[in-house]
Image (cartoon, rainbow, N blue to C red):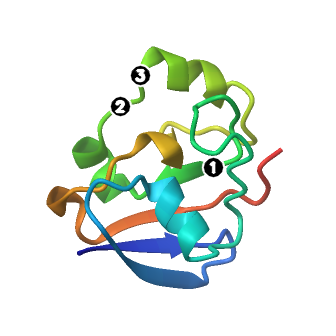
Amino acid sequence: MTKIIFKEHDGKEHPVDVENGMTVMEAAIKNMIPGIDADCGGACACATCHVYVDPAWVDKVGKPESMEEDMLDFAFDVRENSRLSCQIKVTDALDGLIVTTPEKQF
């Protein structure tokens, strides 16, 4: 199991254990993390699972593909470390990953 720490925009933390192979979005939905709506169910067809990857983890998570970059255009308050959580696959290398939800999804 890999530990992911979800932080709400106000700083409240929700550490969860996640099975490898899941996406960060699936882990958020399974654990009822506030601030992750995932309206499209993980199809990279909306931006309601937008998160900010902690700066220490940006390189390990990697950069978004072009389809994800296009969808991020619809997200609220996009930053350099913005990602759609449906596009981040959980692996052992992400143990301890910290992501923060934006103040709102739209």
Task: Say whether disc 1 or disc 3 marks the residue closer to the N-terminus.
Answer: 1
Q: What's the CA distance linking mark 2 and mark 3?
A: 7 Å
Residue 106: horizontal and vertical position, in percent? 83, 44
Dot 1: what SS? Answer: loop
At x 53% / y 83%, what residue is drawn? Answer: 13
The residue tagged 3 is 65
> Total marks drawn?
3
Locate residue 3 relative to residue 67 in the image: left or right.
Answer: left
Q: Does 75 sit above or below residue 14?
A: above
Q: Can you name the residue that lies furthest to the left here?
A: 93
**Where residue 29 sits in the image (x, y, percent)?**
60, 65
Q: Residue at x 75, y 41 (%)?
A: 76
* Label 2 vs label 3, nearer the camera: 3
Closest to the camera, between mark 1 and mark 2, is 1
Residue 39 falls left or right of residue 86: right
Say which residue label 2 marks.
63
Residue 67 as seen in the image, left or right of residue 17: right
Q: Nearer the viewer, residue 13 or 87?
A: 87
The residue lying at 25 percent from left, 43 percent from top is: 59
Residue 86 drawn at (x, y percent): 51, 45
Residue receiving disc 1? 49
Give the alpha-carbon distance from disc 1 to disc 3, as whole Å: 16 Å
Relative to 61, say whether 30 is above or below.
below
Name the one closer to the observer, 31 or 95: 31
Secondary structure category for the residue under label 3: loop
